Image: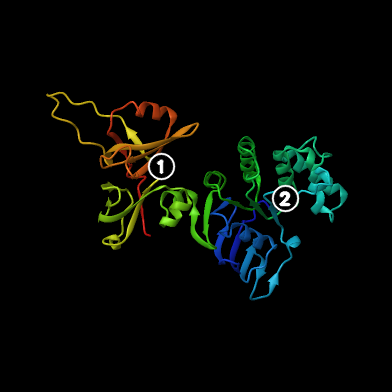
Amino acid sequence: MGANLTVSLEVQIEMRLPDYTLNVAFQAGDAPLSILGPSAAGKTMTLRAIAGLERPSRGRIVLNGRVLFDSDQRIDVPARHRRVAMLFQHYALFPHMTVAANILFGLQDLPPAERLARLERIVSQTHLAGLQNRYPRELSGGEQQRVALARALVTEPEALLLDEPLAALDTHLRAQIEYELLQTFQAYRGATLLVTHNIAEAYRLGENLLVLSKGRIAAFGPKKEVFTRPASLEVARLTGCKNFSRARAIGPHEIEALDWGCRLRTVQELPATAAGGELRVGIRAHHISFVEPEVPDSPTSGGASPPPENTFPAWLVRSSEAPFGVTIYFRLDGAGEGSPEYHLQAEVSQNDWRRLRERPQPWQVSLPADSVFVMGE
């Protein structure tokens, strides 16, 4: 593929599955696309259809101007001719072949000199030098993953599809391989699609985000837009938001959170049609902060200053500690520990928690206007 070629993958497919119909339409360029969704959402099936391993019921797939599949024109290019490489979750290495033989498996039609040149380049690129004569059983999980990636890249594909590439790795290896994948994506000049159910991985590895739910697209666009302004309650939940309330619009930038019992300002401008309609308001747990209590003014200073925007008294219901952070569950109405349920949850560091728990309640909680988002059902 030429260095100046515009990368374009167009997918519009429909496929009947046992529990639902997969129906997706999207485009991808040279910016990595993360496909996020729960189990059985259709993520892997979408990749398999692009790779030619599954045949859609109908639709069209075009890669860099080449039609790979078109149900109306009865075009279905075989997988081996699509120039699409797929990296499977469990790598699918041949156990009886060496590292070198695994990598070269798809290059039998090339002259020996070209095969050797490609092997040397990809071994250097994927940090596999010295391992060429080993067998998969002699490799660590991270090394096996790099061999699978090398085998995918050595064919110089126009599209690289990765199905849960980090799922089989432990925490330490995930961080290491994630960094190596990012380096690979920067150097690779094709379309990259990454399937994951891990929200943090989807955000870190992809520039754009496709959210799937039961075979349909719930959201698609730049990752920051999808996370900052989710289009629906479903998308907000699928992207990890935990705090929601029924809401009604009061003004263009003001809402009443009915379940939280407070009024909130938001930088998001509400359409005129929002008045009287069913709305939801949300805020992500790590966007909530607890502010320092104000020092009372002196009698000659003219009185206390008004509280910051979207700041409310909060009472602790319970907390849940993890090694590096704490989840705080709290209410805004004066009910504290022992309450039947909480209004919101916030994520804070261990250091912030140590300082916070020493303060008398109520604490002052801030729900920043630029982090509050409003959506339909």
Q: Residue at x 15, y 23 (%)?
A: 298
| Residue drawn where x is 60% and y is 68% of the image | 15
> Is residue 280 at least partly visible in the picture?
yes
Task: Please state, as top left, top right, bottom left or bottom right, where the N terminus lies in the image.
Answer: bottom right
Q: Quadrant of residue 326?
A: top left
What's the distance in space between the residues labelled 2 and 1, CA to CA? Answer: 38 Å
Query: Residue 18, percent across and down?
Result: 60, 67
State the residue in front, 51 or 341.
Answer: 341
The nearer-to-camera label among 2 and 1 is: 1
Residue 107, x across and y down, in percent: 81, 53
Report whether 314 appears left or right of 190: left
Residue 320 appears in which quarter of the rendering?
Answer: top left
Q: Amino acid under label 1?
A: Ala
Q: Residue furthest right?
A: 112
Circle 1 sits on which residue? 285
Is residue 1 shown to the viewer in this render? no
Q: Are marks 2 and 1 in contact (CB under 8 Å)?
A: no
Looking at the picture, how far across and down is residue 23, in whole percent?
A: 55, 66
Relative to the observer, which residue lies in front, 325 or 230? 325
Identify the residue position indicated by label 2 in the image. 152
Camera-nearest residue between 109 and 335: 335
Give the side of residue 245 with respect to residue 107, left or right.
Answer: left
Q: Nearer the viewer, residue 123 or 46?
A: 46
Q: Secondary structure at mark 2?
A: helix
Q: Earlier in the sequence, mark 2 or mark 1?
A: 2
